[in-house]
Every structure is written in structure tokens, then in C-alpha cells.
Amino acid sequence: EQRPGTPMFTVKAYLPVNESFGFTGELRQATGGQAFPQMIFDHWSTMNGDPTDKNTKPGEIVTSTRKRRGMKEDVPGYEEYYDKL
């Protein structure tokens, strides 16, 4: 919606946190530095699927997050963390 009496627009949208990294830079570059975002957390939402299965949306998110952080893309099994006596 346009703010009355100004050339400014307010755009409301949901942007998943994991997809928001770099958003400000991309928006400013695409608009020649004229646009600037203000983001507010709105809600949590559960996702269906197994986060350890790369073929599901949660699995894609886990894989991309691990990759971005420089971790091995495959989620280690519980054996990695299970205390051995």
C-alpha cells in the first residue's frame, strides 16, 4: 500500500528466516539503494517432513543451513553423540 502524500510503499510479506540472509543487500542493490526493509518476527510454523531426509523441505533447509555454516551437509546419526561407556 502507498503511504498517502508520499512516494513510499509499505509491503507486508512473510520471509522465512533462513531465506532472509542477504535480503537487505539484494533489495538495496535491486533498487539502487532507494528501498530499505524493516523486519519484525511474526510467528513460528511447523513443517511436515523429516529434517534428516534431503528430499523434504525441512531436509533442504537443514542441509542449506549446515552448508552455509561450513558443516558437513549430512546430519550425523545419534551414534556420534551417544555416550559410550
Image (cartoon, helix red, strand yellow):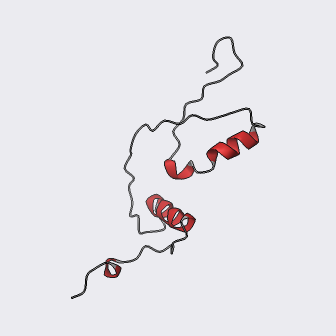
Quadrant position of the N terminus in the picture: top right
Q: Residue furthest left?
A: 85
Rendering quarter of residue 78: bottom left
Q: Residue at x 75, y 36 (%)?
A: 33
The percent position of residue 77, horizontal first and vertical second, equals 36, 78
In the image: residue 77, left or right of residue 9 = left
Q: Nearer the viewer, residue 69 or 74?
A: 69
Q: In this figure, what is the number of numbered marks?
A: 0
Q: From this viewpoint, which residue is outermost toward the bottom?
A: 85
Residue 52 picture location, percent across and down:
41, 69
Q: Position of residue 56 (x, y in %)?
A: 46, 62
Quadrant of the drawing holding the C terminus? bottom left
In the image, taking residue 66 as reference, residue 11 lies left or right, namely right
Q: Nearer the viewer, residue 81 or 76?
A: 81
Which residue is at 74% across, 32% downward? Answer: 34
Residue 61's spot in the image, x, y percent? 49, 59
The residue under the point 64% across, 12% down is 4
Residue at image point 68% right, 45% down: 25
Q: Which residue is outermost to the right?
A: 32
